[in-house]
Amino acid sequence: MSSPDTEELATAPPPEEPTASPVAERGRFWRGLTGSLAAGMVVLAGCVLVIAAICLFTGSPGPGPLMLIGHPVAAVVALLSQRVVDKRNGRVAGFAGLAVVVSVTAALSLFWWS
């Protein structure tokens, strides 16, 4: 025998999946792009710090103090801005995403593309 609750569940139609609007798709792309940039900046900062430690122990010339300070600062700014992008919507998320792009671009142009 089945209970009335299981009969209701068996006859209930499946829930409909929400469809994403074009605006939500653009927001998803922007969040993905800025998240990838922020994560890449964290990896790059970690690599610079590890290379500096290796150079310190081997006596080789390595990255200077400006690089050792600038990369982690840019990574922290990118991560904090990305947190705002992930938690907010609208203009605030857009400007926070722009802050991620600017911090990563500034770090790359100051330390690598010059």
Image: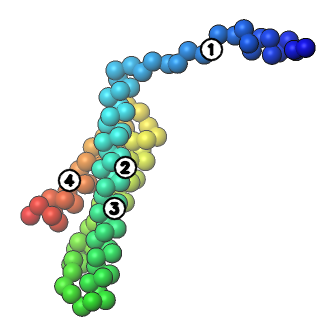
Q: Position of residue 87 (x, y in %)?
A: 46, 40
Which residue in the structure is indicated by mark 1? 14
Q: Which of pointers 1 and 3 lies earlier in the amino acid sequence? A: 1
* Distance of label 4 from label 1 (alpha carbons): 47 Å
Q: Amino acid at mark 1?
A: Pro
Q: Residue at x 11, y 61 (%)?
A: 113
Q: Is residue 58 above or below residue 28?
A: below
Residue 25, image x and y in percent? 35, 27
Location of residue 92 by image quarter = top left
Q: Is residue 73 visible?
A: no
Looking at the image, tell me whether mark 4 or mark 1 is earlier in sequence order: 1
Query: Cα distance, mark 3 to mark 2?
Result: 16 Å
Q: Which mark is residue 81?
A: 2
Q: Residue at x 23, y 50 (%)?
A: 102
Q: Earlier in the sequence, mark 2 or mark 1?
A: 1
The answer to whether residue 97 is above or below residue 79 is above
Q: Residue reaching furthest left? A: 114
Q: CA distance from mark 2 to mark 1?
A: 39 Å
Few, some or many residues within 10 Å of mark 1 (<14, 14–19, 20+): few
Q: Mark 2 falls on what kind of element?
A: helix
Amino acid type of the residue that numbered disc 4 sits on in the rendered structure: Thr
Q: Work out how far the residue at label 2 is from the one at label 4, CA to CA, in angstroms.
A: 14 Å
Checking the image for residue 43, the label placed there is 3
**99 to the left or right of 14:** left
The tag on residue 28 is none
Q: Earlier in the sequence, mark 2 or mark 4?
A: 2
Q: Amino acid at mark 3?
A: Val
Q: Pointer 4: what residue?
A: 105
Residues at marks 2 and 4 touching, judged by CB atoms closer than 8 Å = no
